[in-house]
Image (tube, helix red, strand yellow):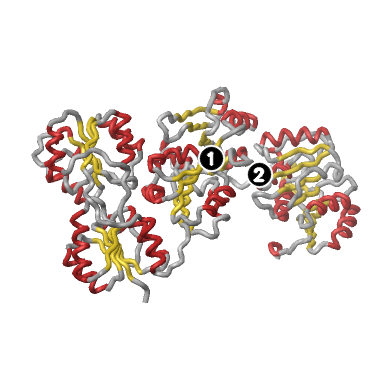
Amino acid sequence: MKNKICIFAGTTEGRILAETLTNLGVDVTACVATEYGESLVTANTVIAERLDSMAMATLFLTQNFEIVVDCTHPYATAVTENIITACSATNTEYLRVNRDSIDSYTSIPDMTCAVDYLRSTSGNILSTIGSKELSSFAGCGFLDRLFVRVLPISSSLDACQNINLPPSHIIAMQGPFSYELNKAMIEALDIKILLTKDGGAVGGFAEKVAIAADLGLDLVVIRKPAQQAGVSLIAATKMLSKRFGTTTKTRVSIISCGLGNPNLLTAEASEHIAAAELIIGAPRLIKNFESLNTKMIAEIYAEKISDIISNHAHLQNIAVLFSGDIGFYSGATKLFSHLTEVTVVPICGISSPVYLCSKLQIPWQDVKLVSLHAGNCNIVSAVRDHKKVFTLLGGDRNVHYLCETLIKFGFGKIRLYIGEYLSYNKEVITSGTALELIQKKFDSLTSALIVNDDACLTTRFGICDHSFVRVDNVPMTKAEVRAVSLSKLQLSPDSIVMDIGGGTGSVSVEIALNVPNGKVFTIEKNIKAIAAVRENKFKFHVDNLEIIEGVAPAVLEPLDAPTHAFIGGSSGNLKSIVDAILAKNASTRFVLNVVSLETLTQAIELTKSFSYREVVHMSVARTKEVGNYNLMMAANPIYIITFGNYSPKNDE
């Protein structure tokens, strides 16, 4: 039978302890007072009701708990007394987990004294003591200047209604609350007096002390009752883990901090940061939590963070902070692979595309997400093929670079939204076209939403011949042949393709359109043909097409290893071209277009040694009006040969 433990878990410490021990295999029953508390806690069994000492004693006897852990709020003295009474009556071991204090302050002993003091003051009052003692304000005479912050649950709102507090004076929110959020709330309500309790570091007391000092508020603190002798959360976790024979690992919380403003932290993230014995992250992120008096190390590189964690394996809880969301171009991805000897808890957050789109009141479920800042991305292809594109910008790939690239490929008039300092007080969102914004100055690290209402959403396969720029005496592979040839290539979005003998570039363009995350090298020796390829490159917005002037195989050496090769013209160098490409990648998939019987004979002989070969003979005829008749006019027949050293799974 598993060991059984009961935790009164209505606080951050209680929730963390219950989740930790449950995950370690201990049979945990968690007691909370409300259904809201039940939704926050992780345990084998959760009891959501207020228990008196008799009900507690009955629970302890029927469940035969080995130990009862009291993690109730420091001010919940009546509940603590009931737990102690029930433990004594049932001979059940009792353990108290105490919340650390920030410092000792001159304060007021109880609510009666607080109300008396507040009657002698002037100016608006913000109460952050919760809802349980709101009845003390009944008939106080200053409800017109009293604002209360309570949990967003019905019992809290009922307590406000019972003292006839105006609805406009009720702030129903779930904490923890950052310095910035407290400051904004206090300034908006013109608060002069802040009424609070000493809730310790986890309760956000440090932030309240700091904000009162900075804004010159009168800070009224109700003294913390004397707590029962107990231990810290960290000590309790280690002691109970050892006692129940469970294997403990350091818990590393990988936390998304949103755009950096602590107001964007989720409640879960705040809890894990508050519980951490060590906080690691970029300097601008960890600076927000200096008031916690927790050890902090500034570091952003995954390998170094992993080493720091290894050197602190004796700690129970470590928090690693990342900006944005850990699933969106985040360094957390690399860190995960290094953390094999610890318990990893990923905590999601608000990413920049979500934030920017919400500010613009634009839905983001159909936004194409890319990042120029994180590395190379084909921003032109993304804009060409999607109505909405979000990208991160930074360094040399900034707003000027984005606008310059879009203008170069014919997108100078589409709409851009540039976000700077998102979520902070100096947040700016600028709207304009690429032509309008290219001369403006922006911060290096920015976010951009690009809206192209004319994006091409259709499949780009077998484009009409007349759509391409043509040059006299330069051959072009016809639409029907291109369609079949590209189907034989079986391209992937990230394919690297060589087009040998590019002609006007019609095949290269269609390949580039179908490999938005890849690249196409067009090898062509004819100067007139190169000019046509260049014009078609910009006409069809394919910046992943690179033109290589010269004769293959001589010019192939410095190019990236291809995954695919299309050979439309070899200038008599077929074997040497194939050998040069295979030297770069022995698994390259080839498609060869042949018109003459001489080249066909050479190709058949050459491809005999490959593990896969297929020959397709293709004849195409198109209608032509002759007087009152439509006649079929045949084009030259062509052989399409597919070959390579690979398994033909997709060809069967």
Quick one: which residue is furthest to the top in this view?
439
The x, y position of residue 579, in whole percent, is 85, 53
Q: Are marks 1 and 2 in contact (CB under 8 Å)?
A: no
Q: Which label belongs to residue 513?
A: 2
- Of the pair 90 and 360, the residue shown nearer to us: 90
Q: Residue at x 66, y 44 (%)?
A: 513
Q: Residue at x 16, y 48 (%)?
A: 158
Question: Does 451 appear above or below 328?
Answer: above
Name the foreground residue: 220 vs 151.
Answer: 220
Give the structural element (helix, strand or loop) at label 2. Answer: helix
Q: Which secondary structure, mark 1? A: strand
* Disc 1 versus disc 2: nearer the observer: 1
Q: Tell me the amino acid under the disc marked 2.
A: Leu
x, y percent for residue 141 = 10, 35
Q: Residues within 10 Å of mark 2 (few under 14, many from 20)?
A: many
Residue positioned 30% across, 29% down in the render? 215
Q: Dot 1 corresponds to which residue?
A: 389
Visible in this render: residue 643?
yes
Residue shown at 73%/64% (left/top)?
Answer: 647
Three-letter amino acid code of the residue under disc 1: Val
Q: Nearer the viewer, residue 449 or 302?
A: 302
Q: Position of residue 229 (x, y in %)?
A: 27, 56
Disc on the earlier residue, 1 or 2: 1
Q: Is residue 592 above or below residue 28?
A: above
**Where the C terminus falls, by quadrant?**
bottom right
Q: Give whichever of 631, 107 is nearer the camera.
A: 107
